[in-house]
Each structure stands twice: as structure tokens, then as C-alpha cells.
Image: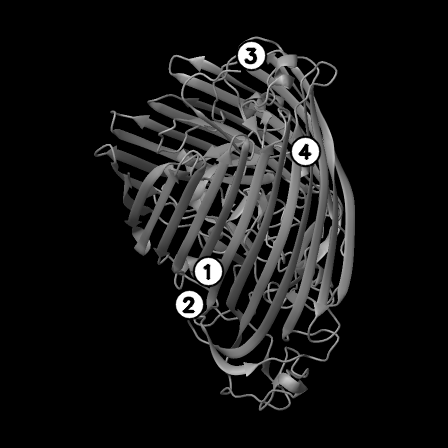
Amino acid sequence: MGVRGLVIISVSTGMVVATSAMAAQDEETNIQNLPPVEVAAPPPPAARRAAPSRPVARVGAPGSASPRTRLYVYPTAPGTGRGLDVDKVPSSINAVDASQIRRTNSLNVTDALRDNIAGINISEVTGNPFQPDVEFRGFVASPVTGTPQGLAVYQNGVRINEAFSDAVNWDLIPTAAIRSVTLVTNNPAFGLNALGGAINLQMKDGFTYQGAEIDMMGGSFGRIQGSAQWGKQVDQNYAVYAALEGLRDNGFRNFSQSTVRRFYGDVGYRAGDSEFHANMGVAKNNFGASATVPAELLDKYWGATYTTPQTTANRVGYLNLTGKVDATPTWTLEGTAHVRRFEQSIVDGNPTDVEECGADPSLLCFGDDTTPANGAGGVQLANPFAPGTILGAIDRSSIRSTTFGVSGQATNTDQLFGHDNRFVMGATYDASTTRYNASSEIGSMGENYVVSGSGVFLGATPTADPVAGPVSLRTVNQYNGLYAMDTFNVTDAFAITGGGRFNAARISLEDQLGTALNGDHTYTRFNPMIGGTYKITPGLTAYAGYSEANRVPTPLELGCADPARPCLIAAFLVADPPLKQVVSKTVEAGFRGTKELNIGTLGWKIGGFRATNHDDIVAVPAVGRTGFGYFTNVGRTRRQGLEAEVNIKSSTLQFQASYAFVDARFLDPLELGSESPFADDATETIQVRPGNQIPAVPRHRVKVGVDYAVTDVWKVGGNALYVSSQYIVGDESNQFAKLPSYTVFNLHTSYQVTKNVQLYGRVDNVFDKRYVTYGQFFDREALPNFTNGGAEFTDPRSLSPARPRAFYAGMRVTF
């Protein structure tokens, strides 16, 4: 099998790409089309089996002898080896490449996902743009500890959902070093938590990126950011790559500074059909402003905060070893080994139930004026505060997790019954140990909502309903997976895929201060999948598939699952009743196609999906206790919808437009605690009826983007995003007014001064739209409204404000 032109064929996470041997730029794609590889007609089957080796671009090619000049492949398993011909993938195709990430001029990979994938919506739940919630089809990957997660995220074939809570810390991902991102749906091979799909990041290395680049940018709100990357193929066998990123942003809100520092490096070795890599990364990031703000405070000042300090410090270090060997012309073996250390420290100012005792003001009690607030050693705390002082709490928590894992995968492309066939099987093992600690310091609340510490710390509370207390917990996760997938070409046009994955999980909790949190939980499940594709014409493919996936409760959820003993989410754990695992059953179908036009390559797709979760898990607030809540199974929920997209790509024009409809609903009746003004006064609960919409999931998303080369050196572009209204969290009964819809316009431009120097600029939120991306109810009685003379808050909403209009300019230099 010959290859036309001087190219290097490489495979990473199933995405086949072709680059010039001297290339120093990232390969480019558009949203619909993955990087093409030009290949000649395949040899006859007998010759193929006898050949000593063959390019991996043959994977998934048809059995006929007709030439095939473009081949796109897509990942179907977590490994870093061969993918599947995109025409054979029985699910939606979503991909973002390095050029699309770079076009945003952002160190947030989530910005590129938002702009280029129809079904993705971004919410700044924390109030910080570097810690966003990524929601796809009503499933979430969030950095907020305590958010029920529904998306798995992989980096170089390694799952990076954090061990303690399955949270995804997007700020730890080195954006400049990302080669491609694919969003894989309808596929259980990606293991636990892939209820809505898996986001698969493949990183650059010295074989695929060669050259050097320095990028510097600055602008509004004190933003200064820079990145540098360098890649080199040292000789025929060795290559190195490194990327360094730094950012400082003062934020538009009070106390919302952000500092990001990241490094990523890779050393690769390649000989014949074998390739090995050692890559590592470290990050040290700090963030402020990590909470919503009462709507009445935002009305006064868009940059307001509520109960500070609010700081998060994230640290990570990891080492991954990957290897791939083409053992025979039709068998590829690969393996990975990884170790990851993650540390997070959170300092969070909050209202508190602690107050001076009614009978003896010299002592501290909880909200009923009689329950003693104890310190260390079980002694009731003396009241060191002046009479009438409004008290608050500074809650501190820390997570320290160490994860080790290994995986192996084998891919076979022998013919079966004279037809092309692709078989993949693999096994994974991951083990994590986490130490979690939390404490609460009582302090005084100022009129600027800043809590000042006093050095008085709460101890254990010997009551049936503890309000707070120190926590020290050790958890151990052991996750095992065994999967197999097979794609059989019935004809050149028709292919069927079937397979599944068996997951086994064991989660152990060891209370370091007592026995209340002790527990040992085991979960097992087999998740099947079946699907098919039919190539109606050379430019039109139909697909359909059914799959199942499961998510086991996290140690955090298991440690906070008792409604009678709620926890301060992400701070205090108090009980360990069992939770059921979540099982999602998904069906999707659609059409996709491409066509060459005079103005460029047209790509389009349209598809529908329905995912039903059984024993879904949600976080339920404890009414009247700010920040407290618990996790519970809520029966069945359903997410269904439609995604449509069209794009055009040429040397002068890139255009894309998409629409996504997501309908997310509860299917079973529920009674939930809520701060809703419609809650029952006696029970402080709301009644959720079948058919009620799930909050924080907008039903409509419209995206339009265009880039146009005015001249050979000057490009201009822009994009628009429309997100429809949504119910706020706590309004699961759908009785309160929705958050308003919003439309945001952004502009960008670049000018190539010389071959190696580019100037660029962008304007975000051109019309300075004031909008919010997330909302929830809050306890209006916890603290007075100091901006209104100390009166009680009247608006029950607490909101996450979006960034106002911002200007940025930068320079990119390549070598």
C-alpha cells in the first residue's frame, strides 16, 4: 500500500493525521471533518496478511479495490492506538483541533468546546471563568466538588476525573499542548461516569508538533497571559515536546483574582511500527470568587461577592507511560501506566448557625439557642464576640489524592468471513487513595460580607443532628474494567458494531476521628452497546446505536447521603448510608455528510438522542442551613433532544452554524428540600412531578461563527451564542420564573506581520450584555442585606454573573 507525498503517518487516540515532515504548525481540521490521510488503493487480502507491516491508516477501509483518497478515523476506546473509520462510527461525531483552540486565544479549552460543539453549554457556577461547568446533553463535567458528574474526561487515554468526587478541574489541563479533543457518545468502553459521553483529549508530542511558538496576550481586568511550546524530532527515533503556560487575571468581581501556572512535557521513541512515550505535567493554580451572589447585590454592583473569603488552590503532578506495538500486520498491542497526585485546598466564608446562647450569652450555641457549640475536647465554646455581633464561619477543606493505574488494549483487523472486521479488547485498573480533612472557624461577619476569623474552631457536636465539626477521612477507590468492541463490514456500505464493558468498583471509607463514616461498598455492572452505519452515498452516512453506561457513587456522595444528617457540601461528611449506582440507557441516530462546493468543503450533520437515567443522584439542599445538603437517588430522569450543524471550510472562509435542543426531565415523583418561596411552610419541601424540567439545563442553544481572510495576511471573524431560559437550581417543581435567555457576540482579528510574527485582538461580549449563566435559591434569612440598611433579602435568587465586555490583544511568534 503506497502513500502519496512525503507524509508522516501517526496515530493518537484513534485520530489519524498527516503532516509534512518539516511542519512547524498544528494540523487543521474543521468541526465535522477530522484530519485527512491520502492513501492508495488497499492490496488484496492475501497480500495484506503476508505483508510485514502496513500503515495504520488502513483501519476501517473497505474491502473493495477502489481507491480511497480520504480516510477519517475516530476513537472508540480509551487507548492511544488505532481508531475506527468515521463512516463506521454509530454515534454523533464531535471534534475540536489545535487550530480551533488557538483561534479563541484562550487558555481555557472549554472556550473552544463551547464555540465548536453544538450540544455543549458553559456555566460559570463558581463565578470564575477558569473553573466552568461543561454541560453536554444535560450531563455535567464540573470542578465543583459535590456536583453529580455525568461526563468522563480522558487525557492521553487516562481518566482524569478526580478520585474523591469525580470532579473535573479544567484549569489543570495544559491548553496549548492539546492536539485534539473528541467527544465520544454512545460508547460504554470509556468506563465509569460516561453517562452522557466522554471528552477525549490527545496531547501533542515531538512527532506531531515541530517548531517553537511564544504567545503573549493582555487586556481587560488585568489579564496577562503567556504560553510557550517547543517540539523537535531529534532524529529518526526520538522526539521531545514541552509547553509552559502562565496567566494572571484580576477578574471583574471583588476578590476574584486568578493565577494559573502549568507545564507539560513529552519524550517519545519510535522505531518501525512501535512507539513509546513518557509524558508528565504539573500545575499550580489559585482562584477567588467561588460562589453565586444574591440578585439584589448584583443589582447594586455587577462585581459583588457574598460571604468571602472564597479561595481555591489546585495542585497536580502526573506521569504517564504509553506504548504501542504493531505485533503483526493485523494486531496492535498497547499499554499505559500512570500515576497522579492531586491536592486541593478550599477556604470558604459562610453564614453559620452558631450564635450566642439565649440563656447565657457568654457561651456559644447553635440556632435553637440551647444546643451547645463545642470546641475541641467536647467543651462548650465561650463567646469571645461583642453582643449583637453577626457571626459567620470560615470553612476549610483539603483533598489529597494519589492515583495509580494501568491499562492494556489489543486491536485486530483480520478479515472475518471474507469481510473487513475490527476487534478491540482491553482491560483497565485504577486505584486511588484520598485523605480528606475539614474544619470550621467561627468569625465575625462584616458589612462587606467578609468573615474575619477569631481562632475559635468548632469541635465534634454530640447530637443526633450535628451542624458542623472537624472531619478526617481516608478513602480508597478500586476501579476495574474489561471491554470488547467489534465492527464488522457486512458490505462496503453497511457496518455493524457491538460490544460492551464490565465495570467493577469498590469504595472504602475509613473515618479517622471515629466510626460514623466507615463503609465498604462494591458495585458491578455490564454495559452493552450495539449500533450500525450505512453509507447511502459517498457523501451521506446514516447511523444508529444503543448503549448503556453506569456511574457509581463517589466517596463524597457516600459520606453525605443521610437527609437527617446533612453536610456542608465539600466540607463536612457525617454519615454513610448506601446509594445505588446510576445506570443510563441511551439511543441515538442521525445523518452526516460532506460535499465539495465552489466555496469550500461543506460538512453537515443532524441527529437525535434519548438518554434515560435510572437511580439518578442529585444534591439536595438542607433548608435554612446555607451550604448544607445531602445526596440521594431520585429515580428516573430523561434527557432527549436534537443536534444539527453545518459548516464550510476553505482557505479563505470558515463558517459554522449549529442548533441543539435538550429536553431534560424528571420521570418519577419526588419530595425535595428547597429554599424555593413555593416550598411547603411546614415541611420546607417542594413536590416534583413527573415531567418537571431539570434545572440548569437550557433547552435551546444556537451558535454561529465565521472567519474570513480579507487578504493573505489579515483575517477577521466573530461568533454569536444564544442560550435559552432555564430553571434555577432548587426549582425542580418549575414554579418560579426562569433565568432569562441571553445572546452574546464576540469579535476577533489577526494580522500576519511577517512569516513568523502575528498580532491579534478580540472583543468578548461586544454589546456589554449583562447576563447570568447559573442561578439557585438561597437562605434569605441567613444574613441581612447590608446594601439596604440591613433589611431582609426579598429576592430568593443567588446568581452567577457573566463577564462584561472585555478587550484583549496579543502577539504570537513562531520559530
Q: Position of residue 451 (x, y in %)?
A: 47, 74
Location of residue 336 by image quarter: top right
Q: Amino acid at mark 1?
A: Glu
The CA span between labels 4 and 1 is 38 Å
| Camera sees residue 148 | no
Question: Which residue does the numbered mark 4 point to in the structure image?
Answer: 610
Q: Residue furthest top?
A: 66
| Camera sees residue 624 | yes
Mark 3 and mark 4 residues within 8 Å of each other at the beta carbon: no
Which is in the foreground here, disc 2 or disc 4? 4
The residue shown at (56%, 8%) is 66
Q: Amino acid at mark 2?
A: Thr
Q: Position of residue 80 (x, y in %)?
A: 57, 37
* Rendered position, 770 above or below 366: above
Question: Which residue does the numbered mark 2 point to in the structure image?
Answer: 787
The front one of 720 and 602 is 602
Mark 2 and mark 1 residues within 8 Å of each other at the beta carbon: yes
Q: Amino acid at mark 3?
A: Pro
Label 3 environment density (alpha carbons within 10 Å; few <14, some 14–19, many ≥20): few
Location of residue 468 by image quarter: bottom right
